[in-house]
Image: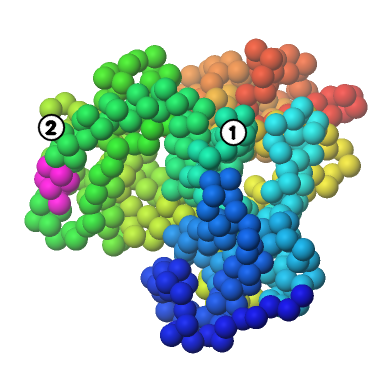
Amino acid sequence: MTWTLTEANPKNYPRKFLVLLDAVRQYNDNIDNDIPLLWKAFQFAQNAHMGQFRRSGEPYFEHVYNTALILTDLSMDTITLCAALLHDVVEDTAISEEIIAEEFSPTIAFLVKGVTKIGGIKFNSEQEQQAENFRKMLLGVAEDIRVLIIKFADRLHNMRTLGSLPLVKQRRIAIETRDVYAPLAHRLGMYRLKMEMEDLALKYLEPRIFNFLEKKISAKREELEAYINNFTGLIDKKLRENGIEAVIFGRLKHFYSIYNKMKKQNKPFEEIYDVLAIRVIVNTVAECYGSLGYIHQLFKPIPERFRDFIANAKSNGYQSVHSTVIGPGGKLIEIQIRTHEMHKKAEVGIAAHWKYKESKDNDDSLDKHIQWLRDLVDMLKSDSANESDFMETLKIDLFKDEIFVFTPKGDLISLPKGSTALDFAFAVHTEIGLRCIGAKVNAKIVPLNTELSSGDQIEIITSANHSPSYNWLKYVCGNGTMKWDIRPWIFFIRLWERGT
């Protein structure tokens, strides 16, 4: 098959390509060298999907084009954008992966193939098949995380245009987005995508709730915007008086978050007070803590709602100082203070680690933030891994909330929310877990199944003559659900079964 491609000449570029190009220029000053490749991918995809239409009636090319545009919001490199433009070519046309490799590069062909494979996976089956589907997906993305980032953009645009599909398909895709893709985006620190995915999933899974929240917030929007402007103005004035230049803006928490608060607290919308979030973006870490002090001079903080994720970063790399204060009129306002670099990472997560020039240098920070993924892949390849173990491990890794606790020496340890003193013992070292006979939390002796809270200091009491107790299994399997980090327990159970 022969493709007629227009030579790269600005006079011949259509408006859509210029829009894409302008979006890339916002973050990549060296795009001029890549224009011929990007233009070729644009035309190739346009020609390949010629005559194909989506259910809404729009040309299919609109989907791949918008997928690429979403990726520019994540500041992705040219190779990724080309793969996004081409990501449905192999699946939906007669063009093979080999042709993509020949016309572009093996890397682009690999990314296209990876996205195509993920697209064929449906996450709505029984546990055994579900585990196999996750295996396929994670094995596919472990080699190049850009496969999953492209899939996120593809899924987000599909969610934005879900309304044209039959209700059954809407619900299936929305559930899959809420239960698989949004948690994965969260685990990779991609909060902007995660929040929009969750809101769109709520729109199609709970339309009455979504419409209710939309009407409530719409009715109060003018009042809330005026409140935010007044509140941020007071902070801005205080910081400027003290020599801190900051970018300050406020927003309403996304619908899915508000809905969860209503469910968790069993309260109506009118009684959910912390629906506003303020972000303060400064230049340095020192200014983060300085700003915090000045803000606390203005507004009374709620001590138990303070979190320092700068000193104690989340496992997905997220960093900010969080404080909830009592604002004017008694409203609870969450304030997030971070540097510009932290803000970028908080918005786009792992995508912020990609460099725009090809480099063979190792990116240690990238490896650090996807180490959990590599660990999962190692488990997949293990002969001893089974579907139940894998799904429980994955479920813990994707949906966990973190707490931060301390050893007697002051070392910080991150654990999933709901962890016990026994989980802490295994987290310190497997041998400590296997030999523990008791624990002290904040200097008080407590049972091993005591649930921990952030800020607790834990001391484990061990005995060389002690061996694991069968009753410990009850701590793991309380109420029939695996609640905490299963990996050390798998190890323990296998030891126990062998009688060692």
Q: Which mark is residue 328?
A: 2
Q: Dot 1: what SS? A: loop
- Above or below, 407 relative to 483: below
Is 176 covered by the magenta stretch? no
- Mark 1 or 2: in front is 1
- Above or below, 148 relative to 469: below
Name the residue type under label 2: Pro
Query: Which residue is at 56% across, 75% downward?
Result: 38
For this view, does 374 lie left or right of residue 81? Answer: right
Which comes before the other along the chain, label 1 or label 2? 1
Q: Dot 2: what SS? A: helix
Query: Which residue is at 83% across, 47% downward?
Result: 381
Name the residue type under label 1: Pro
- Give 3 or 24, whichever is nearer the viewer: 3
Which quarter of the rendering shows the N terminus? bottom right
Q: Is residue 251 visible?
A: yes
For this view, does 37 lie left or right of residue 500? Answer: left
Instruction: Report the magenta residues as a range.
Output: 229-236
Q: Which mark is residue 166?
A: 1
Packing grade of label 1 (10 A; few <14, some 14-19, many >=20) is few
